[in-house]
Image (tube, rainbow, N blue to C red):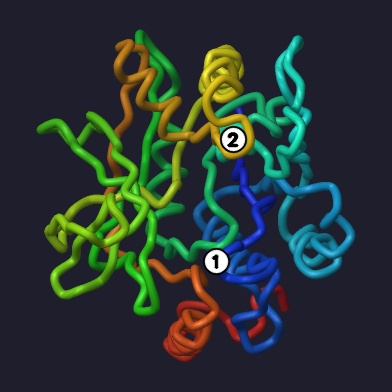
């Protein structure tokens, strides 16, 4: 079996953040969140990383992240383009954005030929998650059903002090396999932790230990084949109902495969604290956390020497 590779979705522009947050330094020597993610992945066993980026940020991305990472990892690039669609489909007039996280993963379909983990570029997941998902992928090839995994986090460890966050709220079976993920786009810290679906007119409370997804998935190659095969059905609906903004999400493909009985998704739990820069006001807290983890010895001051 091929060794697992890490696919990092780094094509998104942070609209709420107000800039290309993937390249905003948070460490003492210009390190970005991605540097810490890759450091954690490398010590867990990952040797190859595939960056999914937009073509227009390639030069800046390589100069500020990719070139130095290439000293310690095998680095490859894939490009998320709006026009990367199945035969017979085209980008509708006025569409500016790519087609979401499932399309981002599909950008790597010509590179990835075995098990892979996929993460967001702008989330700090903590070291435990990479070890959990690497070990799982090494030991669970597809069998009678597709064998996938997801790292779940305690909701209380994933909220922002400065505004709402979007999280996939998970439901599990008794043996910690995923039943469904429900996307909640506006969760606020409170107290209590709660979400709204009507712009704050009403709220529903959530338990602090609710398991949520932060888009850290472990898949076999079969996932890319299934996502590509299901892309036309998504596009038919999107072009008819929401051509300018509809997005093809990873969890929606997972949910389809679960409903069809074609996949099993193990929920691997991490109690690490999430850090991210959803809003510009989040950055000082991320910098302070990275500084504290460096001082404690979890990370060297200069990650790559």
143 or 198, which lies in front?
A: 198
* Of pointers 1 and 2, the one earlier in the residue sequence: 2
Residue depicted at 55% across the width and 34% down the height:
246
Residue 140, percent from left and from top: 40, 27
Q: Residues within 10 Å of mark 2 (few under 14, many from 20)?
A: some
- Residue at left 45%, top 25%? 253
Q: Which mark is residue 3?
A: 2
Q: Residue at x 39, y 37 (%)?
A: 136
Give the CA separation, mark 1 to mark 2. Answer: 36 Å
Which of label 1 and label 2 is nearer to you?
1
Could you say which disc has been placed on residue 89 in the image? Answer: none
| Residue 155 left/right relative to 87 | left
Q: Quadrant of the N terminus?
A: top right
Residue 143, placed above or below residue 181: above
- Residue 150 position (above or below residue 88): below
Please give left or right for residue 210 compared with residue 27 in the image.
Answer: left
Farthest front residue in view:
201
Q: Tell me residue 187's x, y (percent).
A: 29, 60
The residue under label 1 is 16
Number of residues whose C-alpha sits closer than 10 Å to that of mark 1, classed few (under 14), some (14–19) or many (20 or more): few
51 to 186, vertically: above or below: above
Q: Position of residue 138 (x, y in %)?
A: 46, 34
Left/right placement of residue 198 relative to residue 191 reads right
The residue positioned 80% from the left and 61% from the top of the image is 61
């Amino acid at each position: 079996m091929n060794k697992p590779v890490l696919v990092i979705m780094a094509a998104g522009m942070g609209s709420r953040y107000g800039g290309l947050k993937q390249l905003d330094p948070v460490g003492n020597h210009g390190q970005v969140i991605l540097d810490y993610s890759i450091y954690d992945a490398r010590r867990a066993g990952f040797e190859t990383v595939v960056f999914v980026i937009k073509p227009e940020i390639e030069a800046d991305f390589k100069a500020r992240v990719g070139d130095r990472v290439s000293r310690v990892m095998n680095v490859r690039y894939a490009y998320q383009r709006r026009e990367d669609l199945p035969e017979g489909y085209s980008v509708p007039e006025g569409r500016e954005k790519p087609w979401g996280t499932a399309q981002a993963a599909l950008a790597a379909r010509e590179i990835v030929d075995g098990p892979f983990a996929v993460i967001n570029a702008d989330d700090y997941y903590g070291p435990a998650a990479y070890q959990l998902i690497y070990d799982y992928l090494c030991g669970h090839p597809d069998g009678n059903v597709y064998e996938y995994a997801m790292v779940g986090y305690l909701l209380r460890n994933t909220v922002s002090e400065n505004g709402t966050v979007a999280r996939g709220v998970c439901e599990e079976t008794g043996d910690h396999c995923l039943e469904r993920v429900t996307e909640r786009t506006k969760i606020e810290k409170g107290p209590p932790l709660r979400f709204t679906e009507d712009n704050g007119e009403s709220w529903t409370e959530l338990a602090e230990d609710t398991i949520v997804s932060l888009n850290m998935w472990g898949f076999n190659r079969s996932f890319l084949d299934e996502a590509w095969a299901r892309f036309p059905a998504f596009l038919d609906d999107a072009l008819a109902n929401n051509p300018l903004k509809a997005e093809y999400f990873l969890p929606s493909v997972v949910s389809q495969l679960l409903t069809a009985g074609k996949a099993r998704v193990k929920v691997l739990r991490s109690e690490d604290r999430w850090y991210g820069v959803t809003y510009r006001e989040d950055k000082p807290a991320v910098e302070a956390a990275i500084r504290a983890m460096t001082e404690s010895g979890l990370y060297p001051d200069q990650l790559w020497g």
